[in-house]
Image: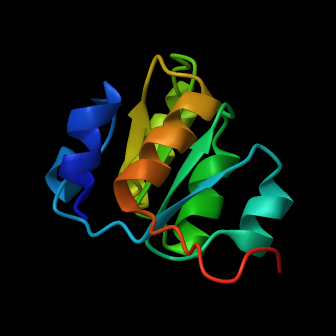
Amino acid sequence: MKLSEILQQLDAAVCTHPERADTEVTGGYCGDLLSDVIANAQAGQVWVTIQVHSNIVAVAALKDLAAVILANGRKPQEDTLRKAQEQNVTLLTSPMTSFELAGKIYTMIAHLDLGSGCR
């Protein structure tokens, strides 16, 4: 699924790199603890967070994420915007909560395996 398709359904605004709307999104990750995101997010995913400081850009670049979505209408700090521009990281903001965003992203791109029950 393309980032542009996700943007249409999330009431999200693009803060940096609107030209990357054709980026392929492979999944999503939701979390605010940077070390957890580093350990568990995968390249191509969109990351939902409430963090707005510049360290989110470093994590997104390190993990080669498709975009970072700031939940709850949070706005990135000025140095975060500058760093995202420099490092080619797409930042988005949405008035939705992290829970709402994660649910919508999940229903858009995940395939539920109802196979054998509990694992």
Q: Is residue 28 left or right of 116 when viewed as pictured? A: left
Depth order, front residue of 64/25: 25
22 sits to left or right of 113: left
- 11 with respect to 100 (left or right): left
Is 18 above or below relative to 14? Answer: below
Residue drawn at x 69%, y 83% as measured from the top left: 116
In this view, the residue farthest toward the front is 116
Q: What residue lies at 56% left-to-right and 19% top-to-bottom? A: 74
Percent position (x, y) of residue 77? 57, 26
Foreground pick, 110 / 25: 110
Q: Residue 71: which quarter of the image?
A: top right
Q: Where residue 70 appears, x then y in whole percent?
A: 53, 32
**Residue at left offset 15%, top offset 53%:** 19
From the viewer's perspective, is residue 24 above or below residue 17? Answer: below
Question: What residue lies at 26% left-to-right and 40% top-to-bottom?
Answer: 7
Can the viewer see residue 17 in this picture? no
Query: Looking at the image, which is closer to me, 14 or 82?
Result: 14
The quarter of the rendered structure image containing the C terminus is: bottom right
User: Residue 15 falls in which quadrant of the image?
Assistant: top left
Where's residue 98, x and y in %? 62, 32
